[in-house]
Image (cartoon, helix red, strand yellow):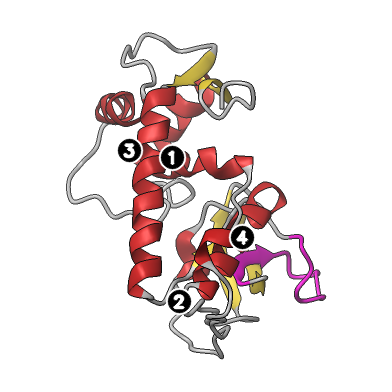
């Protein structure tokens, strides 16, 4: 994880992190990742939260350089993630998978889709082909919801070929919010859960809670 900069000094700068905290405190939809806080969060509150959960510096006067994520807390989060996946597989619950980072993480989530399907879980693929409005730094943009190997992603409107292993970078939860129902990907119980592979990008799972 340290070599890949998934933990330790990471590629995200302290300036970028602090900017995200400020935007989150202002409830900017671009960084809310679907959360609706019950009370007011100030940037200082978010710094303390991220220091507790991820191990970044709790010092508000630290405003430049690389941010640092604690490797031990990352491993703890991965263990919790693995336990939750194991329970889902044992209980054969329906699952919905998606990524806003398809260029790097599609293979990881597709392997999870295969493994969960093999365990008897139904991999959901609702609303494929529907349009999703996402607030970006360029304003409101419309994207198309698609699935590749059971994994949801969004595409630019001018990308017409469904099923291609490319997609747009997005932190919006809107791609998982549609209410429409379309056919589901069938489970394939003949395959073994333990055969599912996970690539090295699994370390990024712990970043999901970052504002």
Spot the residue most to the top: 61
Is residue 164 in the magenta section? yes
Which tag is nearer the camera, tag 1 or tag 4?
4
1 or 4: tag closer to the N-terminus: 4
Residue 111: image tag: 4
- Specify few, some or many for label 1: CA neighbours under 10 Å numbering under 14, 14-19, or 20 or more: many
3 or 2: tag closer to the N-terminus: 3
The answer to whether one can see residue 211 in this image is no
Q: Secondary structure at mark 2?
A: loop
Separation of disc 2 and disc 1 at Cα? Answer: 23 Å
Nearer-the-camera pick, 133 or 144: 144
**204 is higher (above) or lower (below) than 62:** below
3 or 4: tag closer to the N-terminus: 3
Task: Report the residue marked by disc 2.
Answer: 121
Is residue 141 in the magenta section? no
Separation of disc 3 and disc 4 at Cα? Answer: 35 Å
| Highlighted range, magenta | 150-166
**21 is higher (above) or lower (below) than 197:** above
Task: Report the residue marked by disc 1.
Answer: 206
Nearer-the-camera pick, 64 or 189: 189
């Amino acid at each position: 994880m340290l070599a890949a900069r998934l933990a330790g000094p990471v590629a995200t700068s302290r300036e970028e992190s602090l900017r995200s905290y400020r935007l989150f405190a202002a409830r900017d939809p671009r960084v809310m990742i679907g959360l609706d806080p019950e009370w007011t969060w100030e940037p200082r509150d978010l710094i303390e939260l991220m220091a507790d959960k991820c191990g970044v510096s709790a010092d508000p006067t630290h405003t430049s350089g690389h941010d640092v994520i604690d490797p031990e807390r990352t491993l703890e989060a991965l263990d919790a993630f693995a336990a939750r996946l194991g329970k889902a597989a044992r209980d054969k619950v329906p699952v919905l998978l998606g990524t806003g980072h398809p260029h790097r993480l599609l293979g990881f989530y597709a392997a999870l889709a295969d493994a969960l399907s093999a365990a008897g879980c139904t991999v959901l693929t609702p609303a494929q082909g529907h349009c999703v409005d996402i607030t970006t730094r360029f304003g409101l943009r419309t994207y198309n919801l698609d699935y590749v190997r059971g994994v949801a992603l969004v595409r630019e409107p001018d990308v017409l070929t469904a099923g291609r292993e490319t997609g747009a970078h997005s932190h919006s939860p809107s791609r998982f919010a549609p209410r429409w129902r379309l056919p589901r990907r069938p489970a394939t119980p003949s395959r073994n859960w333990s055969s599912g592979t996970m690539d090295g990008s699994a370390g990024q799972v712990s970043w999901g809670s970052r504002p």
